[in-house]
């Protein structure tokens, strides 16, 4: 299935600060332990119609009715590598007895692969010798297994052994006598007690954290399915929790087409959801997580930059252990593509060599007959990821190399924050053109530590490391899991950084961080000229902020020299006029500041990108722009640098160590920020486009002109039905005009050459038209 594994150096960082049941248990399956299963509660599916396994074996990943289709796969070229690997693993000679001498932890994945391959040859081809070898080997494996309870994230190893036992139990069912069945059940239950979820207590949550990974969704679920006839309590508990909590939680965030754990942990944890889907599907219960599961990989497709990397989102380990120049892949793309018959995802899997990474389970679960789609031109350049994310990604193309002229921007409101590996980045943005120009900052894991280290909790996960807004209250206190941390002026960790266990906690506690107020791209749905997103993010902060509204307008200028621009308008109202407000923009190389203009270049590693930011508000006599960072002061928070350095020299980290801070000089509770960014080549660099602003003579709007675009937005980012009048653009020249912040209904627009009635939608609140420069008048004429 193209299983994605975490780099070993990362393993254990998250668990290091978590409570894990301290008791140690024997793994020897000959030591029988009596398990008592309490009555099911609502959290374990009490009252739900949970489907049960079919009364046949095999029933894990395939059934007798699937054998003919599996035989056809052997001749398929895409499956050849998988089939060869299965045969190779089955030929590995092992009795399952693990090396004991001097070992604190002796799990052996090669032996596990051999056992499963032998078991499959029995279930698939009725190879009696292979089947019996698998049974004897798994019994010996479990009896001689040594688990080092101090090994980082050892639950993943323990779960893999449980899964291995369940596979053999199911696939070789009629070769296993009753005493052997009892030994295997006892072994799996004993091992389950050593998982972090502490079977059967299930002490971890169902949305984030290790409890949302394979422990329940694959390992104990597989155990329950295999042993259903002999001990249904195991399945009832595992499947009950899945249907009561796992499925509703995933359907909620799947609707947005994203995974909240970001660009590294998102794909990693998404693959366990896929295992869960396939386990139930092969029992006859398809798509238990719904059709929206098919959308999730598109989050990473859209945020993939032409250099092959993703926009950073949350804790990112991929950049640290992937060599620069090697394209990043999406775990599970082959399975999602084949299961949901998606030709784009199949193409993605083939291009990134995702077939054949896991011989046995790729062979079982991937349908190689879905044809790949090579034409990306039919994919829209912009995509909206609705609540609970609330984000837009806008592109000017689908270029795939470092010299591509494709520009990309991510605009994020951030409606819910799930904690764990998610950052405090509501209202943030990122921009790429021939290099990462506006980026996230900080390093997830390095020489100074990883999850929970000083850099991590004081800088990396915090708002100050992202392109959002700070409001500094010198008396504000911040904590992470009750640990005092630096005052960065940013957003608070929801619920003290404690992870929501289930949907009830997510919706009841303070995990909501924003609201999408408007969104749209158009007028062409495939190659839009503009992409617009507006939201309110005050909920992400303490009561120091009464309002924080931000709008993004990305403009595809269709200009060879300057392909794109983005306008960011902010309205921030603080509870105290003396609280300093800072608009942040992070970059890799040292920026240059000239008046109200900030120039960002990136020429390292073969990049050749440049961005010019023009600050139109605050006005020049109330404007302060300063640059912060550089060697020795890379990650400062409240006057203290929290250093971090990558461990591996072979990495693709962006390495942003600079930021600009835009602030008003005069104190005020209510402040406006208006910044216009345009991207171009660094060398040779064209002359930047002229950027200008004006204000409406009727209505409280600001109007920005750049190239052949005119964008008018309400200064308070609120909607109103009052008349609007402004003059903008050179008379006689044609412009593409966008007017936002309009209430729904009919509006009459009178321009220099035409008068027309437009119907404004509630979701967008916009009007777009082509018109010559001159005077514009808008009037609300009814719903």
Image (tube, rainbow, N blue to C red):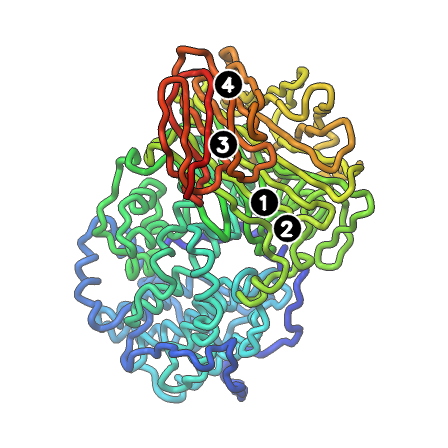
Residue 178 or residue 334, whichever sits in front: 334
For the question of whether residue 184 can be seen, the reply is: no
Q: Quadrant of the N terminus?
A: bottom left
Q: Which element carries disc 2, helix, strand or loop?
A: helix
Task: Mark 2 and mark 1 in contact? Answer it, CB < 8 Å.
Answer: yes
User: Marks 4 and 1, Cα distance to the nearest angstrom?
Assistant: 29 Å
The picture places residue 450, in percent across and down from the top left corner, at 65, 49
| Distance of label 2 from label 1 (alpha carbons) | 8 Å
**Foreground label between 3 and 4:** 4
Q: Is residue 390 above or below residue 41?
A: above
User: Is 298 in front, or is 708?
Assistant: 708
**N-terminal label among 2 and 4:** 2
Q: Residue at left 42%, top 55%?
A: 255
Within 10 Å of disc 1 (Cα), the crowding (few <14, some 14-19, many 20+) is many
Which residue corresponds to mark 2?
539
Residue position marked by numbered label 3 in the rendering: 553
The reply to whether dot 2 and dot 4 touch (C-beta < 8 Å) is no
Residue highlighted by disc 4? 727
Distance from the alpha carbon under mark 2 to that under mark 4: 36 Å
Where is mark 1, residue-wise?
536
Residue 458, position in %: x, y?
72, 45
Where is residue 533 shown, x and y percent of the image? 49, 39
Give the SS element for disc 4. Answer: strand
């Amino acid at each position: 299935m193209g299983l994605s594994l975490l780099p070993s150096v990362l393993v254990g960082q998250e668990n290091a600060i978590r409570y894990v049941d301290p008791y140690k248990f024997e793994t020897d399956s000959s030591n029988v332990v009596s398990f008592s299963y309490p009555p099911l509660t609502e959290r374990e599916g009490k009252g739900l119609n949970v489907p049960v396994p079919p009364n046949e074996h095999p029933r894990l990943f395939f059934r007798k009715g699937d054998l003919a289709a599996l035989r056809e796969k052997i001749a398929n070229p895409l499956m050849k590598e998988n089939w060869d690997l299965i045969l190779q693993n089955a030929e590995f000679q092992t009795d399952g007895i693990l090396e004991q001498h001097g070992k604190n932890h002796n799990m052996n994945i090669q032996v596990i692969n051999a056992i499963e391959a032998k078991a499959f040859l029995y279930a698939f081809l009725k190879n009696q010798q292979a089947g019996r070898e698998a049974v004897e080997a798994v019994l010996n494996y479990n009896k001689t297994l040594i688990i080092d309870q101090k090994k980082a994230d050892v639950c993943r190893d323990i779960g893999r052994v449980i899964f291995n036992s369940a596979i053999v139990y199911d696939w070789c069912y009629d070769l296993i006598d009753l005493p052997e069945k009892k030994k295997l059940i006892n072994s799996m239950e004993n091992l389950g007690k050593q998982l972090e979820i502490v079977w059967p207590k299930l002490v971890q949550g169902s949305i984030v954290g290790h409890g949302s990974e394979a422990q329940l969704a694959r390992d104990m679920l597989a155990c329950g399915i295999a042993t259903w006839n002999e001990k249904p309590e195991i399945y009832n508990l595992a499947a009950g929790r899945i249907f009561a909590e796992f499925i509703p939680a995933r359907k909620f965030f799947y609707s947005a087409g994203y995974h909240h754990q970001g660009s590294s942990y998102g794909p990693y944890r998404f693959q366990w959801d896929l295992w869960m889907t396939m386990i139930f599907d092969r029992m006859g219960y398809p798509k238990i997580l719904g059709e929206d599961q098919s959308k999730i990989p598109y989050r990473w497709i859209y945020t993939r930059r032409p250099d092959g990397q993703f926009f950073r989102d949350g804790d990112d380990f991929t950049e640290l252990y992937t060599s620069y120049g090697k394209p990043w892949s999406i775990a599970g793309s082959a399975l999602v593509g084949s299961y949901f018959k998606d030709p784009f995802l199949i193409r993605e899997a083939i291009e990134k060599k995702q077939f054949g990474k896991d011989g046995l389970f790729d062979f079982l679960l991937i349908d190689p007959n879905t044809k790949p789609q090579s034409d990306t031109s039919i994919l829209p350049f912009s995509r909206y990821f609705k609540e609970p994310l609330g984000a837009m990604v806008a592109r000017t193309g689908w270029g795939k190399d470092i010299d591509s002229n494709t520009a990309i921007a991510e605009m994020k409101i951030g409606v819910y924050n799930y904690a764990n590996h998610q950052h405090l980045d509501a209202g943030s943005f990122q921009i790429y053109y021939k290099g990462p120009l506006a980026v996230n900052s900080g390093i997830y894991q390095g020489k100074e530590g990883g999850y929970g280290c000083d850099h991590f909790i004081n800088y990396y996960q915090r708002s100050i490391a992202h392109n959002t807004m700070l409001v500094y209250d010198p008396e504000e206190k911040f904590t992470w899991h009750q640990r005092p941390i630096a005052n960065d002026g940013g957003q608070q960790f929801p619920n003290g950084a404690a992870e929501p266990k289930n949907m009830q906690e997510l919706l009841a506690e303070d995990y909501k961080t924003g609201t999408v107020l408007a969104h749209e791209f158009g007028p062409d749905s495939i190659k839009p000229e503009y992409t617009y997103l507006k939201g309110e993010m005050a909920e992400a902060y303490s009561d120091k902020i009464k309002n924080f509204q931000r709008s993004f307008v990305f403009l595809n200028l269709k200009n060879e020299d300057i392909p794109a621009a983005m306008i960011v308008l902010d309205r921030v109202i603080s509870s105290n006029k003396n609280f300093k407000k800072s608009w942040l923009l992070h970059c890799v190389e040292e920026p240059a500041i000239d008046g109200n203009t900030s120039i960002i270049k990136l020429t390292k590693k073969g990049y050749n990108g440049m961005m010019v930011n023009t600050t139109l508000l605050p006005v020049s006599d109330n404007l302060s722009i300063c640059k912060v960072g550089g060697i020795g002061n890379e990650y400062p928070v409240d006057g203290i640098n929290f250093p971090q350095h990558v461990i591996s020299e072979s990495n693709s980290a962006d390495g942003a160590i600079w930021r600009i801070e835009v602030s008003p000089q005069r104190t005020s509770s209510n402040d406006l920020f208006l910044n216009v960014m345009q991207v171009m080549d660094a060398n040779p660099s064209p002359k930047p486009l002229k950027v200008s602003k004006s204000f409406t003579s009727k209505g409280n709007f600001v109007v920005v002109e750049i190239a052949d675009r005119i964008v008018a937005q309400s200064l308070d980012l609120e909607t109103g039905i009052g008349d609007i009048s402004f003059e903008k653009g050179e008379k006689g020249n044609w412009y593409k005009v966008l007017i936002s912040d309009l209430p729904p209904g009919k509006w009459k627009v009178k321009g220099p050459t035409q008068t027309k009635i437009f119907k404004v939608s509630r979701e967008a609140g916009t009007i777009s038209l082509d018109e010559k420069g001159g005077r514009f008048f808008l009037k609300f004429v009814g719903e």
